[in-house]
Image (tube, rainbow, N blue to C red):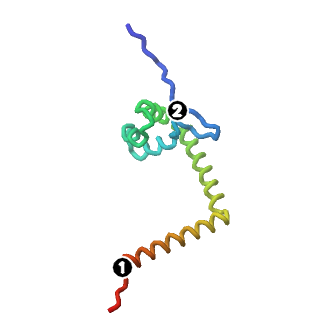
Amino acid sequence: MSTLETTIDVPLTVTEYGSIRIKGSRVSLDSIIYNYKLGATAEHIAYSFPSLSLADIHLAIAYYLTHREEVEEYLRQQEAEEDAIRQQIESDPEYQKRKTEFRERILARWAARQKEANPVTSE
C-alpha cells in the first residue's frame, strides 16, 4: 500500500514590507485572489501569470478558501495602505504641478495631431 501525504506546503511568503507573494515570484496573493473573485479559473490566472505553476495557483486559491477571514482582513489592510500612499502622493504640490504640465503636453500634442489630420483648406 502506498503512503498518502496529508500535508501540502502553501507556496506563500511574506515580504519585508508585509505583502504576501507566491514563493519564487513577484506575483502577490492579492493579484491571484482579485482575479479569482472576478471569476477567473486557475487556468486563466496561469495564463495571466506565466511565471506561476498551475499547482501554486490552486494552492493559493485553496489557502484563500480555507482562510477567507484572515485573507480578507489582509486585503483590506493592503487597500487601506494603498489609499494612504495614493493620498500622500496626490496631495504633494510638486506632483500636482507635474501632473498638470503632463496633461497640458498631451492636450497640445492631441490638438496638433488633430490639426494635421484635418487641415483647414482655404479656397
Task: Please tell me which of labels 2 and 1 falls first in the chain.
Answer: 2
Q: Which of marks 2 and 1 is in front?
A: 1
Q: Is residue 73 left or right of residue 51?
A: right
How many numbered callouts?
2
* Snapshot quadrant of residue 17: top right
Q: Which quadrant holds residue 115?
A: bottom left
Secondary structure of the residue carrying tag 1 is loop
Tell me: 68 left or right of 94.
left
The residue pinned by badge 1 equals 118
Residue sitting at the far top = 1
> Residue 24 got which mark?
2
Marks 2/1: CA distance?
A: 53 Å
The amino acid type, in three-letter code, at marker 2 is: Gly
Identified at 55% across, 44% down, the residue is 75
* Quadrant, the C terminus: bottom left
- Residue at 58% x, 70% y: name it: 101
Disc marking residue 91: none
Task: Look at the image and tell me in which quarter the N terminus lies.
Answer: top left
Residue at the image point whose x is 38% and y is 43% from the top? 40
Q: Which is more toward the observer, 96 or 34?
A: 96
